Image (cartoon, rainbow, N blue to C red):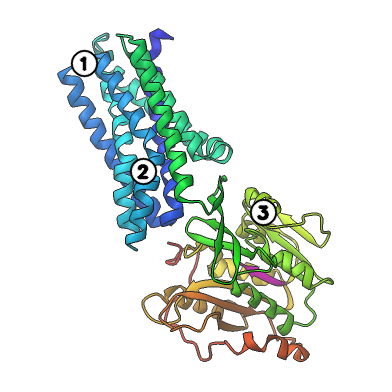
Amino acid sequence: MKKYKIEITVFLCGALGMILELVAARVLSPYIGSSNLIWTTIIGIMLTSMSIGYWAGGKIADKKPDMNILSMLILMGSFFTSLIPILETLMVKPFSAVTNNLVLIAIITSAFIFGIPSFILATVSPFAVKLKDKQHENVGKVSGSVSSLSTLGSIIGTFMAGFILIPNLGVRTIIFIATIIQFILAFTLFTKKDKTFIIIMLIALIGLNLYGKYLFEKNNPDIIEDVDSQYSRIWIRQASNLENSYKVMQVDTGLESYINQETNEMGAPYLYYYDLFDYYNKEAKSTLMIGGAAYTYPTYYLKKYEDKTIDVSEIDEKMTQLAKEQFGLDTSNQRLKIYHQDGRSFLNYTDNKYDTILIDAFKGLNAPFELTTYEALTNAKNKLNDNGMVITNIISAVEGEKSDFIKYEYATYKKVFDDVKIFKVRDITDEEEQNLILIGFKGETNKNEEKYEQYRNLLEREIMNFESDKQVVTDNYAPIGN
């Protein structure tokens, strides 16, 4: 192993660099989301940090190609990695509270919190080339071998983080492991072993990680669980107003589901608009819901409609698990079927037909474009029985600068469905963002006029004579999935 310690170091530092890049998105997502803009910003900052690191590593190595210098660089990387949990609380949270410019927050926090350890990890490859060049004459071969090892480490680190580490260990444990791996590499390379210094540094690094956990819990007493799944970072929180106390599921910045802890009733008013299927199609018996989250509506649906069935397509198994543990989901109910599958994929391949399809898969303001397009909605329409409908919850303004989402979707629904209706959930100005309910009908409505009074308060919120000047959203052109 000693013979290949430089190669092992290069490989592991390449892996850790990519692992930290994926961890960065998870650490920042509860504060600024995980849209394409945020991902683009994080990737750009990390690549910038790495490019500077490659340059700096070469300059340092040329001046003093010493193994102990490389060791101290990696030890510095370990130190800055251990600061990530602390800076999440001391920097990201306060900064996100003072500005709504999410890209600016992403740039500054990515650069300071993750850019520095990425910069340091990037110095390892050119330093290793210089050290190996002292042993070989074939500098081209050495450079190629080192670059190949670093890239291979990055590839394996990416797959390890995405498929294994993040969903099974969580970001805090990964940060701690990354800290310790760098610490071990540093002292493996160090030629002057000082046991006292090693012990002090190890205690300090462990202490910084524990302090980061303590700070987070102290500053976020409302968070019951902080969970990483294969798809998202999920917080289960307690929230309250003057009248009620709620248990909340937060995914990224979006409040996906919440229930009144005293009554177990749904807290989100927009969910009750899904009941409009019961008015517009009195024969409706079967429902598909795309996006389960905490399963508050399916739980409510099963209690209210004892003669109906509901299938749920929820891609994230961990959300289903949390719904059972924290929100009272009963998976033993025979009228409920759960498919842990992407919603678009489920629509593509299922042979099932439904009277109602409910789409509630958007994370806060972030829309997965693949569920918004002409092709997706045409497929959804084909999965409907006669007189069926698709009901979608959208967060948008009705008019003004923030109204693009609903206008693009309205134009697309008008192209696909035989009739389209829009409802406002809250009584606020048309320029403010809120939940809007968009319904697309297949064929004629089959109204249950006897239930008009039951749903009148919802029906009276219909937006009449809505118009859109936007073009139809397609798989080729989807400008709303930011």
**SS for dot 3:** helix
Where residue 4 sits in the image (x, y, percent)? 39, 12
The answer to whether residue 208 is above or below residue 106 is: above
Q: Which quadrant of the structure image shows residue 131?
A: top left
Numbered disc in front, either 2 or 1:
2
Tell me if 295 is positioned left or right of 216 in this view.
Answer: right
Mark 3, other Cα within 10 Å: few <14 / some 14–19 / many ≥20 = some
Q: Amino acid at mark 3?
A: Gln
Q: Disc 3 versus disc 2: distance between alpha carbons?
A: 29 Å
Q: Magenta segment range? A: 356-360
Is residue 100 toward the left or the right of residue 224 in the image? left
Magenta: main secondary structure? strand
Q: Residue under circle 1?
A: 65
Q: State which quarter of the image contains the C terminus.
A: bottom left
Q: Earlier in the sequence, mark 3 or mark 2?
A: 2
Marks 3, 1: nearer the viewer: 3
Please indicate, yes or no, whether residue 364 appears anywhere in the rendered image: yes
Q: Which mark is residue 326?
A: 3
Q: At label 1, which amino acid type do we have? A: Pro
Instruction: Residue 273: name its quadrant.
Output: bottom right
- CB under 8 Å between callouts 2 and 1? no
Residue positioned 70% across, 79% down in the render: 277
Q: Nearer the viewer, residue 417 or 281?
A: 281
Residue 363: tell me if it is visible.
no
- Of 349 and 394, nearer the camera is 394
Label 1 Cα crowd, 10 Å radius (few <14 / some 14-19 / many 20+): many
The three-letter amino acid code for the residue at tag 2 is Leu
Residue, disc 2:
87
| 3D distance between C-alphas at marks 2 and 1 | 33 Å
Residue 14, horizontal then vertical, whole percent: 38, 29
